[in-house]
């Protein structure tokens, strides 16, 4: 009688990764899709800047209005970099609050929701000061001793 073959012959790591990726992509309307796409853009940029060198730490600055969930972003980062040249690289997410300046009364309001309204005088004559950022603040490459 043939015995039941046990799974796992060295390809498990890659397989698990594919499954996770698949699950993220097929979650319609879920947050995973957004973060994964954002993360892919970060990975692309970092890989280009790394120029073949090892990267130890990447810091990104993301505005509140980008509606990126830091935890999901870190998860996506893990997913995309694991087993690549960026494996083990630390991603630091700097969350920038959404702030508006009021043109009517001069008050500054920190927004939770993307409603452009001064909290002091209800004016809509406001300018967005911060909150739409999406940039890579720094890429720290491993220092090579020459
Ligand atoms: Zn105002």
Image (cartoon, rainbow, N blue to C red):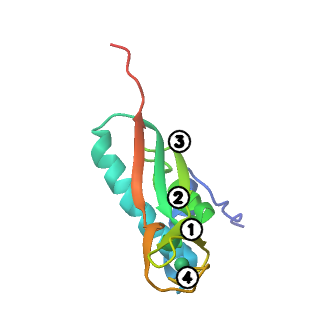
Q: Secondary structure at mark 1?
A: helix
Measuring 53% from the left and 41% from the top, which residue is drawn there? 88
Q: CA distance from mark 1 to mark 3?
A: 18 Å
Q: CA distance from mark 4 to mark 1?
A: 11 Å
Camera-side residue of 1 and 86:
86
Q: CA distance from mark 4 to mark 2?
A: 16 Å
Instruction: State whether residue 49 appears in this view.
Output: yes
Mark 1 against mark 3, which lies toward the viewer?
A: 3
Q: Which residue is mark 2?
A: 79
Measuring 51% from the left and 76% from the top, which residue is drawn there? 105
Q: Which residue is mark 1?
A: 20
Disc nearer the start of the sequence (1/3): 1
Picture coordinates of residue 142, whole percent (x, y): 42, 29
Query: Marks 3 and 2: CB-CB under 8 Å?
Result: no
Quarter of the figure with residue 121: bottom right
Q: CA distance from mark 2 to mark 1?
A: 8 Å
Query: Marks 4 and 1: CB-CB under 8 Å?
Result: no
Picture coordinates of residue 95, whole percent (x, y): 56, 58
Disc nearer the start of the sequence (2/1): 1
Q: CA distance from mark 4 to mark 3?
A: 26 Å
Q: Point out which mark residue 27 bears.
A: 4
**Badge 4: how crowded within 10 Å, few (<14), some, or many (20+)?**
few
Q: Secondary structure at mark 4?
A: loop
Picture coordinates of residue 96, whole percent (x, y): 53, 60
Disc nearer the start of the sequence (4/2): 4
Q: Is residue 85 above or below residue 136?
A: above
Which residue ends up furthest to the top in the rendered image? 146
Disc nearer the start of the sequence (4/3): 4
Q: Secondary structure at mark 2?
A: helix
Query: Marks 2 and 1: CB-CB under 8 Å?
Result: yes
Q: Which residue is mark 3?
A: 88
């Amino acid at each position: 009688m043939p015995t039941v073959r046990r799974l796992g012959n060295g390809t498990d790591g890659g397989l698990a990764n594919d499954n996770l990726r698949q699950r993220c992509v097929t979650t319609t309307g879920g947050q995973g899709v957004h973060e994964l796409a954002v993360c892919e853009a970060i990975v692309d940029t970092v890989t280009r800047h790394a120029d073949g060198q090892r990267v130890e730490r990447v810091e990104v600055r993301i505005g509140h209005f980008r509606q990126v969930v830091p935890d999901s972003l870190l998860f996506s980062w893990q997913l995309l970099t694991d087993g690549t040249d960026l494996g083990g690289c630390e991603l630091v997410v700097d969350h920038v609050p959404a702030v508006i300046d009021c043109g009517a009364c001069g008050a500054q309001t920190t927004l939770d929701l993307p409603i452009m309204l001064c909290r002091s005088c209800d004016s809509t004559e406001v300018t967005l000061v911060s909150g739409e950022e999406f940039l890579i603040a720094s890429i720290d490459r491993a220092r090579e001793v020459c």
